[in-house]
Image (cartoon, helix red, strand yellow):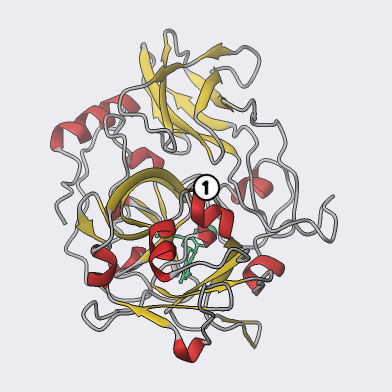
């Protein structure tokens, strides 16, 4: 990895911004055991078994992108170790110009893929369940699943090849409509049922628009936890769409299904119709670069945060420093901002008064999609997009 950890100065700046006295440095010499192989120091991550969430108070306001070492991890089972030399991506189905059974799949090595035009793409990468814990904490209605705060998100610069170039080289039938991406991690077993390998179909239209087969990020190979040696990236879409450890693509002239689009990653319960469609584009969300219950000094302070949308760039962010009584626009930082990445913003708090306060941030994207006061309840706690009330103490 070439990505350097946060500099000492970075930590001091961050620490002074939130009034923390001790400067902490993550201990990276942690042995790789368990479902996640990279170090997940508690200064950077909150661990949830097979998953790990990025701590927003560990984000350096001066860095736009999320490096792999800082990126959240969401594993259904455990990170597999895959040999790059013998790795092959298998492509089959009746949606290829020459239809192929699975046993007769086109087999592509990493070298085959690298021979195609290479490209990079910077986009928000986010789990569908990001913010899930606020269904309980803020709306009094708990939803089952990993109790993420707002840290199952990042903005990553992926390196790879466009899926449309790969499909063109293999030969796509004009009647193809659906592609099923399947991972090489262990089958997902829950409640005594083996659901098979993690896999999810997506429309050919998305494949031709902006899908990427990524072998790296920021010029480095993918880390095992993030899909080494190859993953799919569907920019702007729910994280589950970006299948890691990509083993195969089935291209079909009929709609494909899997439990990951019929049973999970669609809205069920609450006010949702039984046949509501599989989730695709992520909603609008915002986070402060602060610890939960952070203590701030009783003097002028510049607060920072980020907002993002799966559909369009962020157009404006309104913030409230008094629990929602008064609002003002945050100053958007356009530096380094990418079309499909998040937007950094800041606000000057001139007179923080000692006591307890709630900070609110509400973003609106260029399509006019904005964050509601209340997120629509659903059984699996997907898409918590409401404005989060972030408590701080001024002392
Ligand atoms: N093969 C496979 N792909 C997967 C998953 C998985 O468990 N197995 N998890 C999905 C989910 S739910 C998310 S949010 C993203 C997380 O990607 P990351 O761990 O690289 O951040 O990967 C998706 N792709
Ligand atoms: Mo996810």
Residue 54 image point, x, y percent: 39, 49
Q: Residue at x 44, y 38 (%)?
A: 340
In the image, is residue 308 above or below residue 148?
above
Label 1: few (<14), some (14–19) or many (≥20) C-alpha neighbours in 10 Å: many
Q: Is residue 62 left or right of residue 192?
A: left
Q: Is residue 86 left or right of residue 248?
A: left
In the image, is residue 305 above or below residue 228?
above
- Frontmost residue, 233 versus 329: 233
**The N terminus, quarter of image:** bottom left
Q: Is residue 47 left or right of residue 115?
A: right
Residue annotated with mark 1: 149
**The C terminus, quarter of image:** top left
Q: Residue at x 57, y 54 (%)?
A: 205
Residue that extends furthest to the bottom in the rendered view of this protein: 103
* Picture quadrant where residue 256 is located: bottom right
Residue 310 image point, x, y percent: 54, 41
Q: Residue at x 57, y 47 (%)?
A: 131
Q: Residue at x 41, y 43 (%)?
A: 123
Residue 225 image point, x, y percent: 34, 66
- Frontmost residue, 15 versus 230: 230
* Picture quadrant where residue 114 is located: bottom left
Element marked by disc 1: loop
Residue 140 image point, x, y percent: 73, 46
Q: Is residue 342 visible?
A: yes
Q: Is residue 280 left or right of residue 303?
A: right
Residue that extends furthest to the top in the rendered view of this protein: 350
């Amino acid at each position: 990895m070439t990505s350097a950890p946060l500099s000492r100065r970075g930590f001091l700046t961050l620490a002074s911004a939130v009034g923390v006295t001790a400067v902490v440095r993550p201990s990276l010499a942690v042995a790789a055991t368990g479902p996640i192989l990279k170090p997940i120091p508690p200064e950077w991550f909150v661990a949830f078994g097979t998953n790990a969430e990025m701590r927003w108070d560990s984000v350096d306001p001066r860095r736009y992108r999320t490096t792999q070492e800082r990126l959240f991890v969401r594993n259904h089972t455990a990170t597999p170790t895959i040999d790059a030399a013998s790795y092959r991506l298998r492509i089959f189905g009746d949606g290829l110009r020459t239809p192929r059974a699975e046993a007769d799949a086109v087999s592509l090595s990493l070298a085959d893929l690298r021979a195609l035009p290479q490209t990079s793409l910077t986009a928000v990468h986010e789990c569908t369940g990001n913010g899930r814990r606020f269904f309980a904490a803020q709306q009094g209605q708990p939803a089952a699943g990993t109790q993420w705060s707002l840290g199952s998100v990042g903005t990553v610069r992926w390196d790879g090849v466009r899926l449309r170039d790969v499909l063109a080289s293999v030969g796509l039938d004009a009647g193809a409509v659906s592609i099923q991406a399947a991972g090489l991690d262990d089958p997902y077993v829950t409640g005594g049922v083996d659901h098979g390998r993690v896999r999810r179909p997506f429309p050919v239209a998305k494949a031709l628009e902006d899908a990427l087969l990524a072998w790296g990020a920021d010029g480095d190979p993918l880390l095992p936890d993030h899909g080494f040696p190859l993953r799919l990236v569907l920019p702007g879409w729910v994280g589950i769409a970006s299948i890691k450890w990509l083993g195969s693509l089935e291209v079909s002239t009929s709609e494909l299904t899997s439990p990951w689009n019929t049973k999970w990653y669609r809205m069920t319960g609450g006010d949702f119709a039984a046949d509501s469609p599989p989730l695709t584009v992520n909603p609008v969300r915002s986070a402060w670069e602060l610890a939960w219950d952070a203590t701030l000094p009783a003097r002028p302070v510049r607060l920072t945060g980020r907002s993002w949308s799966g559909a369009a760039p962020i157009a404006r962010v309104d913030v409230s420093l008094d629990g929602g009584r008064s609002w003002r626009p945050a100053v958007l930082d356009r530096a380094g901002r990418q079309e499909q990445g998040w937007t950094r913003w800041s606000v000057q708090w001139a007179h923080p008064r000692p006591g307890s306060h709630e900070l609110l941030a509400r973003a609106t994207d260029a399509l006019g999609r904005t964050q509601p006061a209340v997120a629509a309840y659903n059984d699996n706690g997907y898409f918590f997009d409401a404005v989060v009330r972030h408590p701080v103490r001024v002392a």
